[in-house]
Image (tube, rainbow, N blue to C red):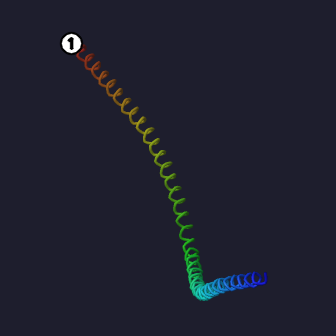
Amino acid sequence: MIAILYWAAMVAAVALLIGAIFLAKTLNAMAKTMDAVTKTMGTLDTQVTGITTETELILNKVNTLVEDVNGKVAKIDPVFDALGDIGVSVQDLNSSVRNMSSTVSNSVKMTEEKVSNTVSYSNAFVMVRELLKKRKEHKKAQQNEN
């Protein structure tokens, strides 16, 4: 029975040794993985620092550009205000020209009517005058015959 105990102890010792070897290999692989992660994190930290620096430079340039654009827009605002005023003035001028054109057109129509009436009256007067003249001549001719 003691031999079985020895054999059992030996099997347990071999199993423990095999477990320790696998555990050592696993821990060794884990240590290598952790080293790779550490190197990657160090590289990543350096790259992030570079990106952060470049981003800050870009943001500073963008801020400068935005300030420049805002300044130029502020300088151009009076031009747009003046253009708006010119547009209003042109609209007022167009309205005045339309009103004046309408007034002139109405005046021309009234004048045309007056001229037409005057011509009609003149024609009527001329016709009446000629008629009277013919009557007078006809009366003279009758008196000369008698």
Depth check: give the residue in front, 143 or 139. 139
Residue at 40% over, 37% down? 112
Q: Which residue lies furthest to the left in this view?
A: 145
Identity of the amino acid at label 1?
Glu
Residue 79 position in % (x across, y down): 53, 70
Quarter of the figure with residue 70: bottom right
Instruction: Please identify the quarter of the rendering in which residue 128 is found.
Output: top left
- Given residues 30 and 110, the one toward you in this image is 30
Q: Is mark 1 on a helix, strand or loop?
A: helix
Q: How many labels does the image show?
A: 1
Q: Which of 56 and 18 is in front in this view?
A: 18
Q: Write down the residue under mark 1.
A: 145
Residue sitting at x 56%, y 74%? 73
Q: Quadrant of residue 23?
A: bottom right
- Percent position (x, y) of residue 31? 64, 87
Quarter of the picture holding the C terminus? top left
